[in-house]
Amino acid sequence: MDKILSIIIPSYNSKPFLAKCLDSLLCECTDELDIIVVNDGSTDGCEKIAEEYIEKYPGSISLINKENGGHGSAINAGSEKAVGKYLKALDADDWFLTENLPAFVNALKETDADVVLTPHHTINISNGEVKNWRCFPSQFGEKYTMDEVMSSWKDFDRSLTFHGITYRTDFYKSEGIRLSEKVFYEDHEYATFPCCKAKSILPLDLFIYEYRIGDVTQSVSAENQLKRIGHTETVLRRMTEESKQLDGAPAVYTAKKTHLLLLSYLVTSLLCDKNRKEGRKLADDMMSYMKTEYTEVYEMSRKHCKILRMLNRMHIGINGYNRILGSKLYNKIRHNKSFD
């Protein structure tokens, strides 16, 4: 049977989570899935879990064992092996919404879009909060060009993420994408390249990805983002260099995505670092680099940086900042659409 969707699962010491992840992919369309578990040098024996599933589903699940190279290297290895019409990455501590998989696979059969977008949930394990992240196109199931997406950015941006993007495999491979290895946060590269060059983008109204958050050990926790702020800088510099080869809508899209990552860097440096002076220096150095190397992103971010520096001097931290972002008044001022 032809494989419709390759699912790449980077797995590093994911023994507590991998079975749930794989179970979420078992349904009436599993025969049409190409599930690739990439064991990225784990030491907890999680590859044995994958082997147990391979015994039961040898035609659908496979395992790559490799030396540790980071999340990006696992996606690189998995994408080389992918044989499905489309490919999507799924972290081993997350899962898919099983009941929507058959409809998703059927939709992929019927399209040739370079990129397919789907909404996703975040599930906060610390407080149980479930939040919807969706896009708001004028018509689901209709293909859009990148120019059209950029002209209605806020209708699409919440699904133009690692968790929302599915690539047509031939398109992804033809662009020769190699994600940065041995760093965190390269998922921003994945959501930018080759998405910026997509000629056709298809949004579907199907929740697929269930994104687990709220764990202090995760790379997205404030503590780890501060500890690994150098990794964010590496990815920002890579995105800056890649942007120099682009023009038109791909350049505008890449600038938008780089701007968003730069904001994350500024929030981390200015609001998470208890050494406020050191945080300001990190932010100022990065903004100086952007002013020279990526003027468009510098201009997009200058006002935000000024506000964040003010919050830094007022000793407002990340929790206070998040309360501001979550307020109804802020979202009304920003004309943000409701998550629901």
Image (cartoon, helix red, strand yellow):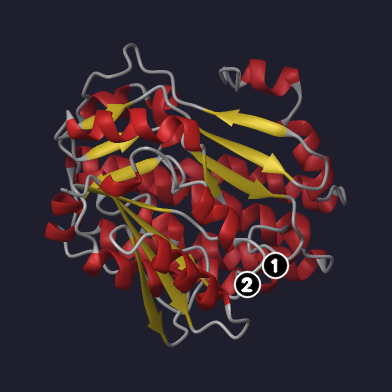
Is 182 left, or right, of 140 in this rendering? right
Is residue 147 depicted above or below 76 in this figure? Answer: above
Going 53% across and 66% down the picture, which residue do you hit?
A: 232
Question: Which one is nearer the viewer's eye here, 162 or 254?
Answer: 162
Q: Which residue is mark 1?
A: 224
Q: Quadrant of residue 107?
A: top left
- What residue sits 33% from the left and 17% below the top? 140
Q: What residue is rendered at 22% in x and 24% in y?
A: 144
In this view, the residue farthest toward the right is: 315
Q: Residues within 10 Å of mark 2 (few under 14, many from 20)?
A: some
Q: Measured from the top left, where is residue 237 in percent x and y?
A: 41, 67
User: Which residue is located at x 79 percent, y 52 percent?
Assistant: 312
Q: Is residue 157 left or right of residue 1?
A: right
Residue 222 to residue 319: above or below:
below
Per the model, the C-alpha gap separating discs 2 and 1 is: 6 Å
Label 2 SS: loop
